[in-house]
Amino acid sequence: MTARYDFASDNVAGAAPEALDALIAANSGHAISYGGDHVSAKAADLVRAFLDADADVRFVGSGTAANAISLATLCRPFEAVAAHEHAHVCTDETGAPGFFGHGLGLIALKGGSGLIDPAGLGQALSYPDVSYRQSPAALSLTQATEFGTLYTVDQIKALTGAAKAKGLGVHLDGARLANAIAAGFDPKTIKDLGIDILIIGGTKAGMTPSEAVVLFDPALSRRFDARLKQAGQLPSKSRFYSAPWIGMLESGAFTHRARHANAMAKKLADACPFKVLHPVQANGVFVEMDESTRLRLVDAGWFVFRFLDGSVRLMCAWTTTPEAVEEITAAMESIK
Amino acid sequence: MTARYDFASDNVAGAAPEALDALIAANSGHAISYGGDHVSAKAADLVRAFLDADADVRFVGSGTAANAISLATLCRPFEAVAAHEHAHVCTDETGAPGFFGHGLGLIALKGGSGLIDPAGLGQALSYPDVSYRQSPAALSLTQATEFGTLYTVDQIKALTGAAKAKGLGVHLDGARLANAIAAGFDPKTIKDLGIDILIIGGTKAGMTPSEAVVLFDPALSRRFDARLKQAGQLPSKSRFYSAPWIGMLESGAFTHRARHANAMAKKLADACPFKVLHPVQANGVFVEMDESTRLRLVDAGWFVFRFLDGSVRLMCAWTTTPEAVEEITAAMESIK
Amino acid sequence: MTARYDFASDNVAGAAPEALDALIAANSGHAISYGGDHVSAKAADLVRAFLDADADVRFVGSGTAANAISLATLCRPFEAVAAHEHAHVCTDETGAPGFFGHGLGLIALKGGSGLIDPAGLGQALSYPDVSYRQSPAALSLTQATEFGTLYTVDQIKALTGAAKAKGLGVHLDGARLANAIAAGFDPKTIKDLGIDILIIGGTKAGMTPSEAVVLFDPALSRRFDARLKQAGQLPSKSRFYSAPWIGMLESGAFTHRARHANAMAKKLADACPFKVLHPVQANGVFVEMDESTRLRLVDAGWFVFRFLDGSVRLMCAWTTTPEAVEEITAAMESIK
Amino acid sequence: MTARYDFASDNVAGAAPEALDALIAANSGHAISYGGDHVSAKAADLVRAFLDADADVRFVGSGTAANAISLATLCRPFEAVAAHEHAHVCTDETGAPGFFGHGLGLIALKGGSGLIDPAGLGQALSYPDVSYRQSPAALSLTQATEFGTLYTVDQIKALTGAAKAKGLGVHLDGARLANAIAAGFDPKTIKDLGIDILIIGGTKAGMTPSEAVVLFDPALSRRFDARLKQAGQLPSKSRFYSAPWIGMLESGAFTHRARHANAMAKKLADACPFKVLHPVQANGVFVEMDESTRLRLVDAGWFVFRFLDGSVRLMCAWTTTPEAVEEITAAMESIK
């Protein structure tokens, strides 16, 4: 029996045809490198149009690097980033913010289902600015969250408003922004939410590896290419990082592929024989399942991870089929 | 008139069909991420076979990061890397070695046509190990060099032998290793040359962005994936970084595409109306050309760079056509 | 009314006469700098004799730097230090371990009264060594702890044994080692406890600013002076950092001054009208006191801090007089 | 025969009585720590009065750290500092600027006798701001220079003016500012010279280890204590770093002790039997002396260093006696 990774993560999927076709189309001919190419220029225009925003846009190869470089842009080493305790930057990036940020700190905030509790942020912001502690200089949000939930626009405004009132910068990790948008989060509102740097995930949205870094504040762009180059994120053949964006945005696949993944998650949650622990608003389903049961599911051929809050995570991707949902549901029924 | 970038760099070319086809082939189905996939395993096997070496192999997205992470692996922050003054790590990576290496230093060595003069290395290694200076802990070589020249096996052994005798680690930047191999440098000898970490350039060899990091010393591999992850170089959809290697190595295209580029450089050098300043052993031709002449060439549609030693650099890629060589030669004749 | 800082910290005290006299004695004449002087050589000999250990000894100006440099010596940036959640390195050094260690992580361990719970360490050491997390590479202990408590030799051995079994290095922050020794912790046993780098606090022990860095493993000493110099901790007029050690160790004041401080803490704890929350084994007394009461005590002239666990901390120094203990006791009685 | 270090460096001298007496005076009583003490407040006032400037002043333990922290304050990691090729930050600090500045680069400028050639600075500032190079973000000057020479006020203005016109910050390494002032450089003019951060050396001026960091631009002060703390340079018993400044500034000894050192250098230069290679404007004399001759001088009991430009350096300190000058002159005569 071959192990099936369908629900292990949304990065187990390949690239969607719209992305791959655009990459192939961009392959012909010679193009100047390091982001100066016509493909990257067009992709950046499409991102700006998608966001209805006049912002600087770069394409990089790694979400971890995109996040960490953003946080290093917003903070100095003796400062800290406030983020949800289960945010990817806190838990799954091997300390990349501290590496790219030269020791910058992380302040772990609590909150149900991956959503930062405003009271906790308020408390973190209220501590006196003493020399022996790394005071917060940035707030990092995640939309959709690690638990497949969504902030409302008002919730985001409340958090960024509190941060801005204290002079903090704001980063939004949008590794799964496509899923949030597919669920109704309007990309054209982002520019008004008090966010300084937005990362839009291309990889999980169905592209070959690519993440868009969107700088809303032009002051942050100064020498940003040098920052990227030093950090190993200014690609020479840059067209391969930008081309998939053209295919996905022009066709609308960026959103509709995510809408499919979200729908599969909803279908899975509806049929799932285990208790679902978080609202299913994007493409993840988190269920209550003890370890021996999870191992039986793995033995039955379905590889799934235990997640940060102790739940078992079932992720849907643009490739998830209704049949796969039905098959894993049946498998869960049988091992329950 | 459209500007032509044919000779601006070897990264202006797209990906070769062998690379792209393999990438497309690897796209189907689900695969576990972060390097654990079957595609990366197969590609690593092929690299090991190509080198006839039992080594750890990783695939990353950026040559700058690959080099800088390697040097950080070999040195501590209060130590230095000895490299040719015109090596990419010294001149073109925005201080990435110091960024990834937390301030590690660079010791610039002299030598004609990009080849380190052994006497200069000997002198650098002979300085007393004092506390106020960053003493060398690694030697970084480049093959083919930035000037399109090659070290012989004996020349490399002389340099690495001197370095090893002093306890240094050795890094080889093989961004253009394909061109060196196409010119006769036997990849199966590399394991015996005293090199600890080898970077093999996939990007310039005709792939979508990918570089192979080869760790000959297993002691260096300890937690290397964590090092890569923290540095933003452990890709989630890792198959896209490894797949092109399968296509290029299985088909032999890795070497024969480079052989073509080398042949185009030879053809260009033979016909070139300007004085050729360095031996043409790989895919670059460096000519004597004053600035007003270079600007006339650019005005005539051919974008070319002035290089580190004051020469004008004409690079050939796997895509360079004999016709393009003839056209730029004619253009050079006309503006001379 | 002048504010009194007697119990605010043990660094509010000046230098003991034994330290100051030795500093004055070392002042005359010319001495070679950067640690090569005869004063530093003699002080290092005295530290070695005090510890009955053949170890490398350096004198630096800052406990924060001494700790952070030690941890950076034991770990790489993608690794972490396991320490008590209230250890100074975790709470009061503005992220210095991450700064000097280029992003190295901290793993906060629980345990009553500042003493690491072995079960918690065991759990931290049992996590799989995955690439997305900073795995522990060092254990950091504090003796006496931040809460004025002491580990027994067996307790330390249990912790360092568990760490060593997993290949970790061990750092001991001895900012208040003098107080621990005065309370019975035998300095001659330290070399057998599995500690790689020991910091002995001179400053809190009654010296002008100076901390001794003791490297038990000679492999760690390689180029250590270069490490210190780069980190701004290789003093030019090094005799001023080492001289106080001669005065304090030759006279026995290092221990007997600490014994006095410990005795004052005991006296204070015995008379204190507030509930004492941790065993008083060194020079600190931690009491239960609500905020309005603390502010009344401050208003009454006695500046004291609220500490990490919510208690109010009363520290005794080598300068603390029985009269001051009686006066603050009376003040506490009156505002209770 | 005991080796004599009188002329080896100006840090071989102890502390002047004015400094030591002030340190002893500051020792009594309890004082709040980490720079909040009354001694540090008074010393900062005296520095401000000395400079006739409203600036933030901090006292730290190490010139290397003071310089490196300043440069890290003025630059980001992907930027560089332009400094004289023989400046202490370039040659003698083990890469501390890159360590504290997370890989920031150094651009080595030429110029006779340690004085930056304005044309060279102009050229460095004229390079295009490209992503693959660390562009200059700060200029670092040294007064008096490493070669015992002085910039005029106009020379400094020309250099800082050029830097400011390009948006750079300016750092002045005043490790030997006392000697410059004693030679006529007016401290009250410094505030008008376009300098953002000034380091005033206390150590070489005759203090126990202490350097003053003067921040002329209040924007740079934001969270500066946290920066110092993280970097291991916010001393707990801070009064010991500031007290010597009170003694030296109130008494005028800061300048008149340096004037004596300068006079001794002049006397030595006048009598010296070897060719003097740089103008003797401060406390250093640099002579032409081959290596066998230098070794004979060392054998004769006088330890002296060969310096960066190949000369032999003879430094005078506040402790240098006319007799010592005569004795070394005689020794030089005898071994010539």
Image: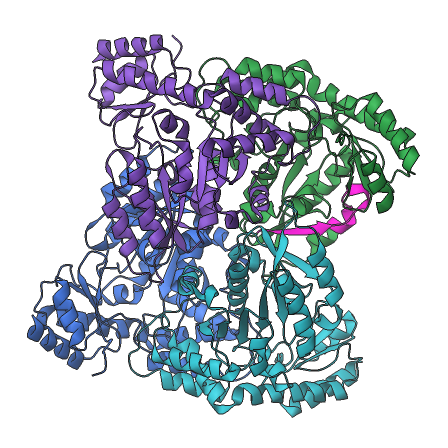
Chain colours: A purple, B green, C blue, D cyan
Task: Name the one closer to the observer, D306 or D308.
Answer: D308
Question: What quarter of the picture does the C terminus of chain A occupy?
Answer: top left
Q: Position of residue B217 (x, y in %)?
A: 57, 34
Range of the magenta residues?
Answer: B104-121
Determine which quarter of the picture holds residue C142.
bottom left
Count of residue discs: 0
Question: What quarter of the picture does the N terminus of chain A occupy?
Answer: top left
Q: Is residue A247 above or below residue C13?
A: above
Residue A194 visible in the shown view: yes
Residue A107 vs residue A49: left or right? left
Residue B86 vs residue A140: left or right? right
Task: Name the one closer to the observer, A162 or D182.
Answer: A162
Residue D11 visible in the shown view: no
Residue B217 vs residue A143: left or right? right
Q: Position of residue C173 (x, y in %)?
A: 34, 58
Residue at the image point whose x is 69% and y is 46% from the top: B91
Q: Position of residue B336 (x, y in %)?
A: 92, 38
Q: Is residue B26 above or below residue B283?
A: above
Determine which quarter of the picture holds residue B142.
top right
Q: Position of residue A150 (x, y in %)?
A: 31, 32
Task: Name the one closer to the observer, A315 or C322.
Answer: A315
Residue at the image point whose x is 44% and y is 59% from the top: C55
